[in-house]
Amino acid sequence: MAIIEKLITLVRGTATEAGQAIVDRNAITILEQETRDSKAALEQSKVDLTKLMAERKLASDKLDSKKAKVDELSASIQKLVAKGDQQALALEVAGKVATLENEIKSDSATIAGMDANIDRLRASIRQAESTIEHLSRQIDTVKATASVQHVRLQRQAPHCHGLAGSHPGAAAPEGCAAGRGKGAGSLQRRRRSREAPAGRWRRRHRHRRGGRAGPLQQAGGFGLTPSCRRRRASRRLYPQG
């Protein structure tokens, strides 16, 4: 069970590292997309805030109108009561006032909810603006870092070239070695493959013009060059003295 848990942990760690590597390679793209999303959310919040404030203004105007109507009816009730013979009409007007007062309470609660939503939207807008500024600074930082790395690699490239030409065995900087590791290994393999047949030829065929024949040549002339064969045949036909 411990081994299985370790394997699961290894898989999770590998996936995390791979995901982080992808994020690092595409940091600018991700930050720019997050900036666009934040700007879109900011614009939508501003539109919602504008609509909500317009609705709140209409509700507030209606509430003020109802309050004014209540004040007007209340004054009428006092006049009717003062006359003494308008009790029935005064009660009817009082009923209207009670209805308006209930509507005023309901409208006041609605407006209070609108005010709370307006405050939340304003806070959301401020947060979105702060997020956009933070993302913009991050984008500038990442671009500056990428530019510095690009310039550094460009400066290292001629230096790596010089090391490869003048000092084949010299240790190259880390950035250079990573770029030419496979190429150097392949070049060495090709060089050994070209040198191997020549070395075998020199070891097996030591004979040169005017030199001594090797063991295989002495045995029967195997591996002799055409000029050597002609000189050997000439010696056999015309032996010296």
Image: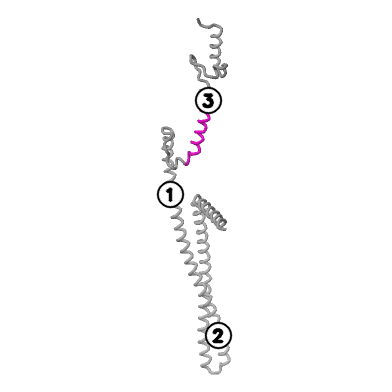
Q: Is 110 in the magenta? A: no
Q: Residue shown at 50%/75% (left/top)?
A: 112
In percent of width and height, residue 141 lies at: 43, 52
Of residue 87 and residue 98, the one placed in the foreground of this image is: 98
- Give whichever of 237, 152 is nearer the camera: 237
Q: Which residue is mark 1?
A: 145
Q: Name the amino acid type tagged 1.
A: Thr
- Residue holding disc 3: 200
Q: Residue 231 at x, y = what percent?
A: 53, 11
Where 94 falls versus 126 (above or below)?
below
Q: Which of the labelled discs sits on residue 166, or is there none? A: none
Q: Contact, CB < 8 Å: mark 2 with mark 3?
A: no
Q: Is residue 10 above or below residue 51?
A: above
Magenta range is 178-201
Res. 134 image quadrant: bottom left
The numbered disc on residue 98 is: 2
Furthest toward the top, the residue is 241
| Residue 14 image position (x, y, % from top left) | 53, 52
Disc 3 versus disc 1: nearer the observer: 3
Q: Secondary structure at mark 1?
A: helix
